[in-house]
Amino acid sequence: MKKIIFALTAVTLMTTACTNKQQTTGIDPANLDTTAVAQDDFYQFACGGWMANNPLTPEYSRFGSFDKLGLNNLEQVNGLIQEIAESTKGQSTKYKGTVAQKIGDLYNLAMDTARRDQEGIAPVQKTLDEIAGISTREELSKVLGAAMDYQLWAMYVDADAMNSSMNILNEYQAGFSLGEKEYYLDNDEQTTKIRNAYVAYVEKMFGLFGFADGAERAQTVLRLETRLAKAAYSNVELRDPQANYNKMSIAELQELVPQVDWKVYFEALGVTIDSLSVGQKPHLQEAGKMLAEEPLEDLKTLFTWQVIEGAASYLTTEIYMTSFDFYGKVLSGREEPSPLWKRAVGIVNGTLGEAVGQMYVKKYFPEENKERMLALVHNLQKALGIRIENLTWMSDETKAKALEKLNAMTIKIGYPDEWRDYSKLDINAEDTYYANLQRAAKFEQEYSLSYLGKPVDKKKWYMTPQTVNAYYNPSSNEICFPAGILQYPFFDMSADDAFNYGAIGVVIGHEMTHGFDDQGCQFDKDGNMVNWWTAEDKAAFDARTKVMEEAFNKIEVAPGVHANGAFTLGENIADHGGLQVSFLAFTLNEEAKPANKRLQTRDGFTPAQRFFLAYANVWAGNIRPEEILNRTKSDPHSLGRWRVNGALPQINAWYEAWNVTESSPLYVAPENRVSIW
């Protein structure tokens, strides 16, 4: 199973509001569209002003609250990186081996398009020649084990799902560039258009790399990728942890896929193991058959394409723009690529993320933010505990296990206690940009493989501090909230509880609920994939989640295109749980205050109304039609509009706060509403 990271509590709960100055409501009237009727289209009412004030620019296929905060963070990080890059430029010897040298040189290499245009495809020529030099099928096991640029499957190290304290090697399906199998198999007009454009793109790229037979090679790529895609699991099938965990010995792997000499493969990979977990057996078996059945030259064409694809963003401007024309324009509707500085910062962030994060938190993350977040998290834990205790559909036996898991959750806020060591990463300004990124990829691979067969590092973070996101990791039963997300519109130290519980409070509840969604509920308090449910309770849970799945299946996201309730189920459950849990925590907190203050209307809205406005504003955004279709195929999260208009009609408190009646088009009868956690 590929690592599951889910990226976006009778006690008196401690207040989290600021007491040293006048609190604001945190609600910006400019975000609202008061011409809309809240009860008829809450998303438009709460976010219409924001959408009008933040139109899509040519650079974006989607731009929302997350993206706006991400842009702000990117500008802050760019300032930090630029300062280093300017001070170290031309002085690599003086700073050699320091983090400053590595950040500065990598950023300057990323910004130097003139040099890349002059170098052409020379940086990848050696790899292309190596592929061209493969002369026998017997070489493939060793070649694939050693390859960094091409593969028919992926290998990574992660916690053993059945023994979460130890790391194991995991296999995962790969080898088809479009990512989603539906792009190869569906025959509707839009998908066919994308597939035809993909073939044209592949042909053009082969031409740019000096191949005269690009049209023929493009058809070969499509045929082989389609063969892999047919055998691959769908996104819904990939959500089943049990089906994607298949631990076996190397002897059993050899029997499963005899076309690969796995001893040779693992020697070339540089690992010694006696077992691993195969993620998707049908795909790996098909990949093995391809290695034996397909013409060697066709396999080499596919490997060559994978190298070309992987290098496209790091070579000439023409090659980069050709790639953007397909992935940016055709797939997502973007009109222009991101500015070069944003791409450069992204590369540095992706390569030296924690080194950059250490600078970021020192300058931009006040310690008091961490303290207030901890208080919020503990309040949400208490509220979720109350809701579990009050469940009518769950037995006391299962409740005890659920509460045990909740109380065992590890909480990570802001930044890691220990920073990553980048001393072995070699960044050399004299080398090409591509060569440096190849070494960075090798550094990451060796870092990952260094954990193989060792105990899981519980202190490890899976997001950098500057990231605008959060996650739940079932194998370690932990929730993590990086410093980057702890800002407006998610978190505001000057705002009152209604705002913070509606925004970051729901995010906290969302991540906690992931521990109890349809995937997370299959892992115990220690992160092991074991059943802690009675059969009756699990059946009741499944019946309730089915209501959620069917509710979202009915949503038409574009003409004739419906949301995929099974694919988005986990995130929808987490949104639902986050809302329920955070509203309870907020209500308990408000009940500790005098009644006249609890019911106080500010800026025209009651505290309960402000709670739901704050939640909706988190998902404000504009999106292109192409990206709607793309995300419906590829994103396990519902679209922003439906994280509001699809989620809130399932929440009883929303009806009460906004006086929503049966006349509302969003109305769902009480007996038909989702009720889980």
Image (cartoon, rainbow, N blue to C red):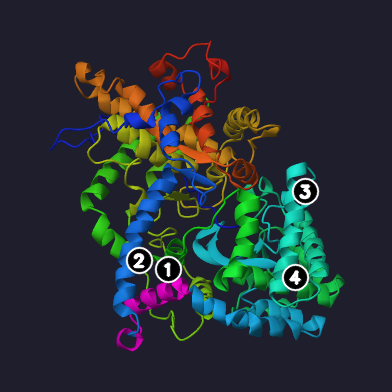
Location of residue 165 with respect to 260 vertically, above or below: above
Return the residue nearer the eye: 406 or 19: 19
Label for residue 305? none
Q: Amino acid at mark 4?
A: Leu
Location of residue 123 with respect to 388 vertically, above or below: below
Query: Residue shown at 71%/76% (left/top)?
Result: 262
Q: Quadrant of residue 289?
A: bottom right
**Residue position marked by numbered label 3 in the rendering:** 192
Query: Residue shown at 42%/26% (left/top)?
Result: 33
Location of residue 370 with respect to 337 vertically, above or below: above
Pick whichever of labels 4 and 1 is earlier in the sequence: 4
Pick whichever of labels 2 and 3 is earlier in the sequence: 3
Q: Amino acid at mark 3?
A: Thr
Q: Amino acid at mark 2?
A: Val
Q: CA distance from mark 2 to mark 3?
A: 42 Å
**Residue position marked by numbered label 4 in the rendering:** 302
Q: Position of residue 448 (x, y in %)?
A: 51, 70
Query: Residue shown at 64%/42% (left/top)?
Result: 629
How many residues crowd around disc 3 within 10 Å: few (fewer than 14), some, or many (20 or more)? some
Q: CA distance from mark 2 to mark 4?
A: 36 Å
Q: Position of residue 377 (x, y in %)?
A: 33, 42
**Residue position marked by numbered label 1 in the rendering:** 348
**What are the residue bounds of the magenta stretch?**
92-112
In the rendered view, does 93 fall on the left or right side of 135?
left
